[in-house]
Amino acid sequence: MKGEAFYHALKIMDSVCTGCTHCMHLCPTSAIRIKNGKASLNEAACTDCGMCLKTCPQQAIIVEQDDFSQIFKFSYRIILLPTVLIGQFPEDISEEQIFSELHNMGFHYVMEVDKATEILSEETRKYMEKNSHLRPFISNSCPAVIRLIQVRFPSLIDHIIRLKQVMDIAAIYVRKKFIDKGIPAEEIGVFFVTQCAAKIAAIKCPVGEEKSSVDGVINMDFIYNKILLAINKNKDKPIDKVPEQYHLTPESIRWTLTDGEASHYAGRCLAIDEIHNVIEILEKLENDEITDIDFLELRACDHSCAGGALTINNRFLTIERLQKRMENYVKNHYHTVNKMPQYRDFLNEQIRLTGKILPRSIEKLDENMLIAMEKMEKINRIMKVLPQIDCGACGTPSCRTLAQDVVQGKAKLNQCVFMQKILTKEGLITPEESMELSAKIWGAEKFNK
Amino acid sequence: MEFNFNIEGGNFSRAGTASSEIKKILKQLNVDSNLIKRIVVALYEAEVNVVAHAWEGNIYVHIRPDAIEVTVADKGPGIPDINLAMQEGYSTASPEVREMGFGAGMGLPNMQKNCDKLQIESEINIGTKVTMLTYLKPQ
């Protein structure tokens, strides 16, 4: 992480955004304001949770991705798939077909990232034994939750398990595997298919490590379309045999679904999904209202990664598809040879996060407590004159955020429509001036009807 | 700066709301996060004590540049033997209250642990007043 700049894959397209305020009201860190009729993002507060994208009725929020042709910069190309990708496809499309089409697209090797969960869960167990003073442990798996803790719950940072993400462990492993086969390191490109924006941020701007082991990201919706089109085109041809095994143990398949991690560990483990639910639990944890918890699996999306912002399939259908996949594994006596344990020593050396997870509090009104107290008094005074209906017409999510923005010099009190009416009635501003103020927030075109 | 919050006796569903509100304020004032944790933990214990034992109560928070003073006063049965109540594990909570996961007898000891100065005044059948002082800088 470099300085104050935070990479966000979420982008608001001004040409499509109508400033409808849906995202502004839902954002769990109040990172969105409306200016000139468009949503605008406070980059320091955004956690890449993707709530804004999911709620946007205009599809004006997108997840920026690397150009697909970037893969050809590397002569040996590896693609890492989360199991949720398999869950996007109907049951009559097999894993082998999906793998086969990825080979046709130019990938030399296909690997499911969740294979690495076996090693990660073992190491997590050891980590928890060794660091029992840091209970309750918070899973490191959801990058949006890590960022949420940094900005809103910095006192809980020490509870985050300081191990790498599954995708990084898988990338380190697969790269080493092919280096050992004699392929020069610089020719190997490892690409991760992502179900959400938070994983992209974790790759481009990692927390707790210098650089991610993943070279590039491919959005799930993009690769899904590409695979499906190819399968439809080749549906009459026999499937090309693929060199990899395409079965995965039920434990690995389950990992990114809710309770996939928590069910692995001993003691009192909780699995919580959806970011507002996560916030509720973190509040309680911070107050010591809940104690005696050993492990917390916290995921930003509803129904965990099955509900990721870049998924296509309905999340309940995805879960059903993956459950069938688990059942098939057992029913057909599939067997997966996981060669990763052969690299255990090598991976264990690199599995820990070496950098710091820094607090990035967005709550403080000022570094200096005395100034912060003055500002708070000012906010309380402003709150008394505001209508407290949180209508959002001022371009901020609530009366309180307007008051905060005013004392921080980021907004003016007369952005409030109630204030404008009072000021107009008392002759302190003209109706035209009131119009101008509103036009600044909502864009002039909204008033030219 | 001063803040006041009311506590409703017997209503466990609201226990912790005042603590959360005060936590928000302290975060905004950029109080050190470890200190916030101590203050809020102590306050939460006090808040739950009022809910579990008293009829009604009030939290008064005084934020000073050097320290944060929290006073939790209630109208309630009072504490007959404060020294006994200060012992870990000693509890007078009813079985119903214990069933809800409260009343383990760690309230006052936890409050003691999480503040710099604890003062308790209590009168039987009138009420209890707990004052907790936490210095912002090591003394």
Image: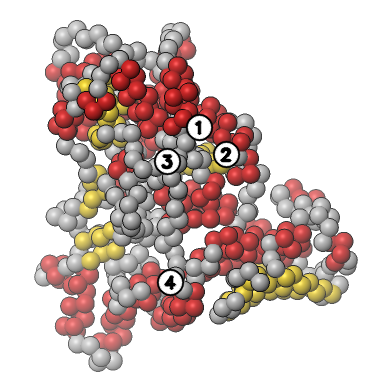
Q: Are marks 2 and 1 in contact (CB under 8 Å)?
A: yes
Relative placement, left or right, of A284 versus A231 is right
Q: Which residue is mark 2?
A: A295
Helix, strand or loop at label 1? It is loop
Q: Which residue is mark 1?
A: A261
Same chain, labels 3 and 4: yes
Q: Which residue is mark 4?
A: A366
Residue A13 image offset from top left, x and y in percent: 18, 52
Nearest-to-viewer mark from 4 and 1 = 4
Nearest-to-viewer mark from 2 and 4 = 4
CA gap, disc 4 to disc 1? 39 Å
Q: Are marks 4 and 1 in contact (CB under 8 Å)?
A: no
Residue A408 image offset from top left, x and y in percent: 36, 74
Same chain, labels 3 and 2: yes
Q: Quadrant of residue A136?
A: top right
Q: Chain of mark 1?
A: A
Q: Chain of mark 3?
A: A
The circle drawn on residue A142 is 3
Residue sitting nearer the eye, B83 or B55: B83
Image position of B87 with respect to A343: above or below: below
Residue B108 at least partly seen? yes
Amino acid marked by disc 2: Phe
